[in-house]
Amino acid sequence: MNKTLLSIIIIAALPFCSQAAIDVTDNFSISGFGSTSITQSDNKTPLFVNREITDDTCYDCDTIFGLQADWAIWDELSASVQVVKRPQDNWSEPEVEWAYLAYHYNSLSFKAGRLRLPLFLASEYYYVGQAYTWARPPQEVYDSILGFNYFDGLSVSWEYDLSDEIVLTTMPLYGFSNTNKTDYDSVTLEFDTERVAGISFDFSGFNYRIHMNYMNAKYRIVPSPTYETLNIYTFGAEYSLDQWHFMAEVETDEIQTNWYTSASYNIDKFTPYMVYGESHQRRKSNSITTGVRYDITHSISVNAEWQNIFMDREDYNAGNSGQFVTPPIAYGEDKDVQLYTVMLNFIF
């Protein structure tokens, strides 16, 4: 197993950054993470939900800073809280991304509180840039539900050894009524979610992981009085072969289908990578990303990345936004965009 996949499995399986955490007491620790970048596109149309990158050089479009506290109350009972200044947040208004109690009994884990939606391979460590190879998780998939990452409710996780090499993890979940807001196309959208229900399956082996998830949400966009139902299906897989690491994910629902595939190759402290992605229906675009990550230490890394996002002329003329926040035709801008990023990630 290469060190890229190993680090992902460690971070996904344990309270993140536990190896770098500050032990306040024998059973209480604090850890943290962050990312910041210098980024610029060649198109003045704002690019990416919650980041809105333009042709003006931006020093805070990707800025993330998070703190996490973990408390082992006793052997079976623990608590965790994570507060994150996300790219869209002011420093004075960070978001509580998770806050839960967990009870572990043999192969079962029960959690209650604010929990991370288990939609994608990188959902558990979405804001921890040090945990993945790219500067940003592929926007086609990870922005497909407008950046919503948590729910308030309950989950049960069950692990079962299918063989000496394969572990199955099944997790049903239920989320109660909640309200989320996001800024989109110069307006603030308020989503009133009546309930969320879903189930995920993970198959993990020595050098691979397969993730499947189904989620059903009943919601309305305020002030509309009508609730709608959305069924989201996701499938992802990652595989490691010597220094190679491959990932691919697809998300589909009633209004869109999005996918990407990624390959990276580790050479000591350098990891060059490429990503190809597509969005269909609600958003229509294609993208090619290439970059290199340099690990300064085990807890600090730098990414240099170039991304080309493009769409068909017919979709552009029809006012499709692609990965832009608003249709570029409304700005009189080109349908394609080149994006340049230098990203710094760290954990402590």
Image (cartoon, helix red, strand yellow):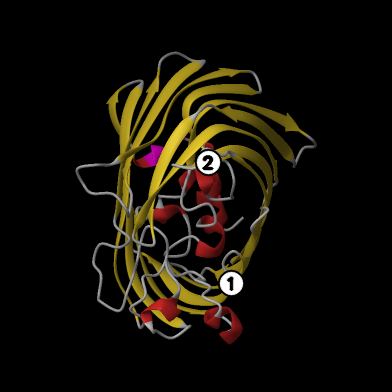
Name the image quarter holding the N terminus: bottom right
* Residue count near mark 1 (Cα–Cα under 10 Å), binned few <14, some 14–19, many ≥20: many
Question: Judging from the image, what secondary structure is the residue with disc 1 in?
Answer: loop
**What residue would you read off at disc 1?**
284
Q: Residue at x 44, y 13 (%)?
A: 74
Can residue 109 be spotted in the picture? Answer: yes
Q: Above or below — where is 163 with respect to 106? A: below
Q: Residue at x 65, y 32 (%)?
A: 171
Q: Magenta stretch: give its range.
A: 15-19
Residue 17 in the magenta stretch? The answer is yes
Q: Position of residue 196 (x, y in %)?
A: 59, 34
Give whichever of discs 2 and 1 has the lower sequence position.
2
Q: Residue furthest right?
A: 163
**What residue would you read off at disc 2?**
220
Q: Which amino acid, by three-letter code, is at mark 2? A: Arg
Question: Judging from the image, what secondary structure is the residue with disc 2 in?
Answer: strand
